[in-house]
C-alpha cells in the first residue's frame, strides 16, 4: 500500500515539483560517480500543449541528495543540453507541442556516457459526460483511451491542493480501463466546483546507468475537468 501511494505521488511530481527530498543541492563532481541515481522524465501537458523534459540526479538512490551536474559532466535530450533549474531540482527544458520520442544522454565527470530512450507515451481523456460527483456514492470513471499496458499507471487528483480538501486515486492493474472513486476519498472534497487532473505514465528501469540505477518515464496529462461536487 505504501509503494502504491508513493507511485501516485510521483505521478504528479511535475505539478508539485519536489517530494521526499530536501532542497539541498550538491556538485556531482564531489561524490562517487557510481553512486549517482538518475531519474528522467518527459511530461506532456495537453492543457498547455507543452512538453517538459527533466533529468534529476541524486546521490545514493531515489531519495538521496540532489545533485547539479557541473563541467565536465552534463546531460542532454535529443542533443539539447539541459541547464540546471532549481525549481525542479534537476536539469530542465521546455518544448512547444507534444514530443513522443527521444533520448537522454548523461556524461559524468569521468567521461562515461549513459544513453536512455523514453518509453512509449499513451494518451487518455476524461469522459465527456462527466460533470458531477456525489460524495455519498462511489463512481467508476472510464477514461477515453487504451487499457493499461505493462509498466503503466494512471492517477487522478481532485481538489485545489489545499490540505485536507483533496483526493488521490490510482490505477495500475494491467488491462484496466477505469478508476474507482470511493466515498472515503470523495468525502474530503468541498462542495462546489472542483478541478480534476489525470495523468498516465509509462515508467521503466534504465537500460544504461550507474551501479545505483535509475528510472525513465513518459507522462501524459489529460485536459483538466471541472466538475460539481455535492453531498
Image: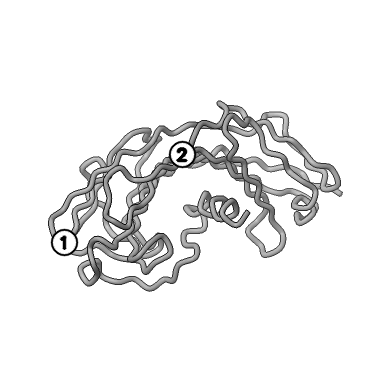
Pinpoint residue 26: horizontal percent, then vertical percent. Answer: 30, 71
Element type at marker 1?
loop
Q: Is residue 14 left or right of residue 4?
A: left
- Residue placed most toward the observer, 172 or 67: 172
Q: Is residue 201 left or right of residue 191?
A: left
Residue 11 against residue 201 in the figure, above or below = below
Instruction: Determine which quarter of the picture holds residue 84.
Output: bottom left
To which residue does mark 1 refer? Answer: 109
For image coordinates 62% across by 31% down, the residue present is 176
Q: How is the image coloured?
A: one colour
Pinpoint residue 221: horizontal percent, then vertical percent. Answer: 52, 40
Q: Disc number at residue 175?
A: none
Pinpoint residue 121: horizontal percent, then vertical percent. Answer: 44, 34
To which residue does mark 2 refer? Answer: 202
N-terminal label among 1 and 2 = 1
Element type at marker 2?
strand
* Number of numbered discs visible in the structure rendering: 2
Residue 40 against residue 153 in the figure, above or below = below
Bin the neighbour count of mark 1 within 10 Å (Cα to Cα): few under 14, some 14-19, many 20 and up.
some
For image coordinates 40% across by 32% down, the residue present is 120
Amino acid at each position: 500500500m505504501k509503494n502504491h501511494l508513493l507511485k501516485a505521488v510521483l505521478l504528479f511530481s511535475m505539478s508539485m515539483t519536489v517530494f521526499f527530498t530536501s532542497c539541498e543541492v550538491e556538485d556531482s563532481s564531489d561524490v562517487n560517480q557510481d553512486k549517482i541515481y538518475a531519474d528522467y522524465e518527459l511530461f506532456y501537458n495537453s492543457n498547455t500543449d507543452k512538453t517538459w523534459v527533466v533529468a534529476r540526479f541524486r546521490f545514493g538512490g531515489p531519495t538521496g541528495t540532489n545533485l547539479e551536474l557541473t563541467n565536465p559532466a552534463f546531460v542532454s535530450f535529443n542533443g539539447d543540453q539541459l541547464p540546471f533549474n532549481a525549481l525542479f531540482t534537476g536539469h530542465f527544458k521546455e518544448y512547444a507541442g507534444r514530443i513522443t520520442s527521444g533520448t537522454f544522454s548523461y556524461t559524468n565527470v569521468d567521461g562515461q556516457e549513459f544513453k536512455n530512450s523514453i518509453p512509449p507515451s499513451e494518451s487518455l481523456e476524461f469522459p465527456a459526460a462527466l460533470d458531477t460527483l456525489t460524495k455519498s456514492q462511489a463512481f467508476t470513471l472510464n477514461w477515453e483511451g487504451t487499457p493499461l499496458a505493462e509498466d503503466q499507471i494512471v492517477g487522478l487528483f481532485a481538489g485545489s491542493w489545499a490540505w485536507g480538501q483533496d483526493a488521490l486515486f490510482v490505477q495500475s492493474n494491467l488491462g484496466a480501463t477505469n478508476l474507482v472513486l470511493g466515498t472515503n476519498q470523495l468525502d474530503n472534497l468541498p462542495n462546489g466546483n472542483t478541478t480534476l487532473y489525470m495523468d498516465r505514465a509509462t515508467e521503466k528501469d534504465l537500460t544504461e546507468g550507474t551501479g545505483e540505477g535509475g528510472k525513465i518515464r513518459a507522462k501524459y496529462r489529460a485536459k483538466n475537468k471541472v466538475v460539481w461536487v455535492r453531498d
